Image (spheres, rainbow, N blue to C red):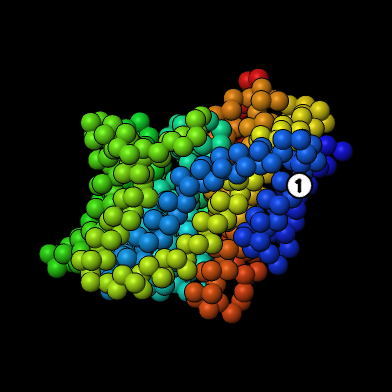
Amino acid sequence: MSLIIAAAPLVLVIVLLASGRFGALAAGAAGLVATVAAALVLRGAQGFAGFAVEQSLIGSWLSWQVITIVAGGVFFYRCVASRAHAAPVPHTSAITPDHRRLYFVCFLLGPFAESVTGFGVGYIIALAAVTRLGIGGVPALLFGLYSQSMVPWGALAAGTTVGGLLTGLSPTTLGALCGLLQMPIHLGYLALFWFFRRGIGPAPSAAERLDDLVWTVAIVAAVWASHRVIDVEIAGAAPLGVLAALRWLRDERPDGAALRRAASSAAPYAALTLALVLTRTVAPLQAMLKSLWAWQPMSGQPPFPPFYAPGFWLFAVGLLSALALRAPLASVARATIRAAWRPCVVTLLFVVMAAFYVAAGMAAIIADALFAAVGASAALATPLFAAIGGFLTGSGAASNAMLMPMQAALAVETRLPLDWVAATQNSVTTNLTMLSPIRVSMGAAILALAAGDGAVYRRAWPLALPPIIVGVVTILVLLSRG
């Protein structure tokens, strides 16, 4: 009976999302209400009011760390979008092969934009760039989805930060492990990229494939290595930004005028990346900002240093960009509120739900039941749950908040390394957000696709295979060593 009560809120959320009739906001609200009710039944009424207040405060505090990034990312994008050229989209050139430009958009430009702002902004930018290359319809949406291929570091690693906070792991440590898992995942994405490429024209030549392979290895290696010197928030954006600039210079060979246009378009992104890199690599500056007016209202919970937090720099650079462009700040603020309130509330609901799940022992109850049923093999459910969560919520932060407590408890039961189980959950769930109905329907609406979402899924479903296969293999390796 305890298992049914503990699992009911998770099942409710999954059913509501899978029905297609309810969004993440409604599902999160229903899930939180069900979680509080389940915790009341399992714990009893005595002292529950104080317990509920405490867990609500803890969940709210943890979610605040991410909400500032969510709101800041939306504000930054709205400020930058007020310019005529909202992103450094490469200019066409007769001497550059289309294949090279398409690779640039899919593996560098789109993922870089997504890592800085998140929430599908990279998808919007990638779709615009892909259509400028003469690709339309379902193929355009298919290649646009590649902008979501580095979502473990999307929105300045908001989802990875949630995963780290809920497991007690350093988000940067978690990000580095995800960087290792991303290596085979990205090779799988590259193979599928070549396969999809054949659907719109001649297959890539051997030289083009070799060039793609070298750049793909460089991308994932640079992202992984960056965790050794900078925090996870910028570990994706910084190397992707540098590599995108180098690739653009190599392929386009721009003249002075083109360089000035590109520099003007890229200036806000470059300023944000530079600010975040400096505050995370210059030790005295890092120490000062981490301690300056740091808030820690609850003992045992992570502090919030406002001038070190990524959200501050998103707001600061965005505001400076808006002022430089003489953008109407009132309109920017209204657009930010309209776009940001929903993902902020969704994050709050799911993280508070996760706090109740852990404190009430509900995650442990589910893990105990899985372990009792199939033993250590229960860990194989980790990538499957992660895939479902990412697909349904379309958010690494929401999925991690919903599932990470259960995955952590399962790691304890099966005696597998918590860091690797958490990395599997985070890596699989964030990568699967690229195929979420939220992303696919958004792209179909932008391009006014007559064929509908189903046509996209019939072509795009293989993109789910690389992260799921890597996740399952990772758990099998951990089990073999245990």
Q: For this view, does 189 lie left or right of residue 23?
A: left
Q: Which residue is located at x 47 percent, y 58 percent?
A: 119
Q: Is residue 176 above or below residue 10?
A: above
**In front here: 459 or 238?**
238
Q: Is residue 368 visible?
A: yes
Label 1: state its secondary structure. helix
Residue 117, horizontal then vertical, whole percent: 40, 56
Which residue lies most toward the left here?
A: 256
Q: Which residue is located at x 34 percent, y 72 percent?
A: 330
- In terms of image quadrants, where is residue 303? top left
Q: Is residue 206 above or below residue 232?
A: below
Q: Is residue 207 visible?
A: no
Q: Which residue is located at x 23 percent, y 31 percent?
A: 284
- In terms of image quadrants, where is residue 179? top left
Say which residue label 1 marks. 37
**In front here: 377 or 153?**
153
- Dot 1 amino acid type: Ala
Q: For this view, does 202 lie left or right of residue 453?
A: left
How many tags in the picture? Answer: 1
In which quadrant of the rendered image does the C terminus lie? Answer: top right
Residue 45, horizontal then vertical, whole percent: 78, 39
Q: Which residue is located at x 47 percent, y 62 percent?
A: 340
Residue 11, horizontal then vertical, whole percent: 76, 49
Q: For this view, does 202 lie left or right of residue 104?
A: right
**In front here: 42 or 263?**
42
